Amino acid sequence: DAGVIQSPRHEVTEMGQEVTLRCKPISGHNSLFWYRQTMMRGLELLIYFNNNVPIDDSGMPEDRFSAKMPNASFSTLKIQPSEPRDSAVYFCASSSGDLQETQYFGPGTRLLVL
Amino acid sequence: AQKITQTQPGMFVQEKEAVTLDCTYDTSDQSYGLFWYKQPSSGEMIFLIYQGSYDEQNATEGRYSLNFQKARKSANLVISASQLGDSAMYFCAMREHQGSNYQLIWGAGTKLIIKP
């Protein structure tokens, strides 16, 4: 079975550019999570969706960040305009909504903003 | 307030020895879940093991077991017969409900290095 798929795996961009990260959750999973990981702040939850609806976006740093989930098999995280402090690894995770609700992570997108 | 505490920032262990990674948690929920994830140097986050608050038996998955002591609010990960490939960051996380939804609360992680 395919796991969570993220693209691109690596992104290098210049400050001010728009960045779009993509995620395909595991088929049948109804919850999707976007995380950011940095050495300084560890793993931070940015936003999560349940049945394609954003439930909690309190972790989104500022208005430059936006996330969408137009259908059950696709989500995007967009940063516009990007800044060097956005450099991090961005993970997408999904869970099936069963009692255990284990989150399964994608491989991550390593973003570097110059 | 810190809800998940991993007191060991780093550990060195000799290959083939058993390893215990500490995790303590704080919650007022009666129903919660505890997870351990492994993050090798390649960067992916790998789910290892889960313990539900109502589970009476300690969870086990191959060489991994979870030493769950509910009264002490601890959920230590035990790795038996450690291997070089066990070198990684290990994160403890707790499922916390917020109304009808939930989030995972993460610890800061423990970096484990297995020495040959």
Image (spheres, coloured by chain):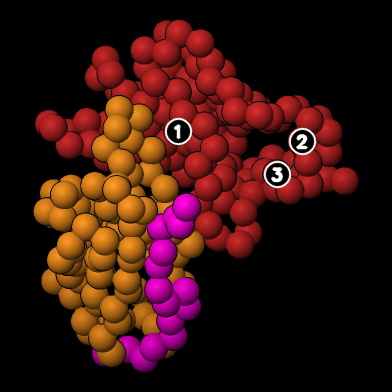
Q: Position of residue B101 (x, y in %)?
A: 17, 37
> Is residue B16 within the magenta segment?
no
- In the rendered image, what is the letter of the chain coloured orange? A
Magenta range:
A1-16
Between the residue at mark 2 and the residue at mark 1, the CA separation in whole angstroms equals: 20 Å
What's the residue at 27%, 52% (across, down)? Answer: A32
Chain-order first, disc 2 or disc 1: 1
The residue labelled by disc 3 is B86
Q: Quadrant of residue A67?
A: bottom left
**Amino acid carrying mark 2 in the image:** Ser
Q: Secondary structure at mark 3?
A: helix
Residue that label 2 marks:
B82
Q: Work out whether residue B101 can be spotted.
A: yes
Pointer 2 and pointer 3: residues touching (CB < 8 Å)? Answer: yes
Output the letter for the chain in red.
B
- Residue at (42%, 77%) from the top-left corner? A8
